[in-house]
Amino acid sequence: MKSLLFDYGGTLDADGTTWLERFLPLYKEAGLNVPLERLERAFYDSDDNLHARHALKGLDLAQTVRLQVEDVLKAVAPERGDLVDPIAGRFVADCRGQFQRLTPVLGRLAGRYRLGVVSNFYGNLEGLLAAEGLRPFFTVVADSGVLGVIKPEAAIFLHAAKAVGADPAECVMVGDSIKRDMKGAEGVGMKRALISVADKAPDAGQDWTIRSVADLEAVLG
């Protein structure tokens, strides 16, 4: 293997947990009394349209997350703007805790492989990673918001493989989504490492199943 390619959300910023799964308990703990279905709809509406509603270029993690939370609260509880900073702050703190844990791991992996990120994001992921001190580890950041293609489309994976100077068969895609990460990478002939915290991980034909990026060194040898 020449290259390791990482998803961002649920892979680099958390161990196999989506943004929605991480946000829901934060809204509940903040005392927001909104039906779950309505909150989920507001989350996905914010997530899908954030790049269209806001000028995100140059925004860091905290600024991006704050806009996401702000849009959700405007939709479900416009009178609770006081919750934006506490909820966004908790989410960002959790992300940064994960970055701190993974930084030495990524440093060691970058000494053995060419690393990259392949993410369905808002177009500002490269700057976000730079602001968090993670950008130097990665040869390429393939952000769907910049490239105009999204996982599981083949083009975004092939772009990353070309950027790291490797054939797809020489790359391992590491991610937590079966549909976007595992199936997309499989379609271009990459090996796959699925991050799953389930007691019984789903079988998506992945080559490895791990609970965290921190486990990669052990399984790759």
Image (cartoon, rainbow, N blue to C red):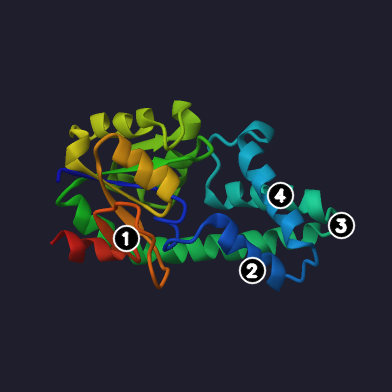
Q: Amino acid at mark 2?
A: Pro
CA separation, marks 2 and 1? 23 Å
| Identity of the residue drawn at 24% across and 29% down | 162
- Residue 203 in percent (x, y) is at 34, 58
Q: Are marks 3 and 1 in contact (CB under 8 Å)?
A: no
CA separation, marks 3 and 1? 39 Å
Instruction: Looking at the image, tell me whether mark 3 or mark 4 is earlier in sequence order.
Output: 4
Reply above or below: 181 against 12: above
Residue 104 seen in the figure: no
Reply above or below: 194 against 59: below
Q: Amino acid at mark 3?
A: Glu
**Which circle marks residue 79 in the picture?**
3
Q: Are marks 2 and 1 in contact (CB under 8 Å)?
A: no
Instruction: Looking at the image, tell me whether mark 3 or mark 1 is earlier in sequence order.
Output: 3
Residue at numbered disc 4: 41
Given residues 119 and 130, the one toward you in this image is: 119
- Residue 181 in percent (x, y) is at 38, 45
**Which circle marks residue 25 in the picture?**
2
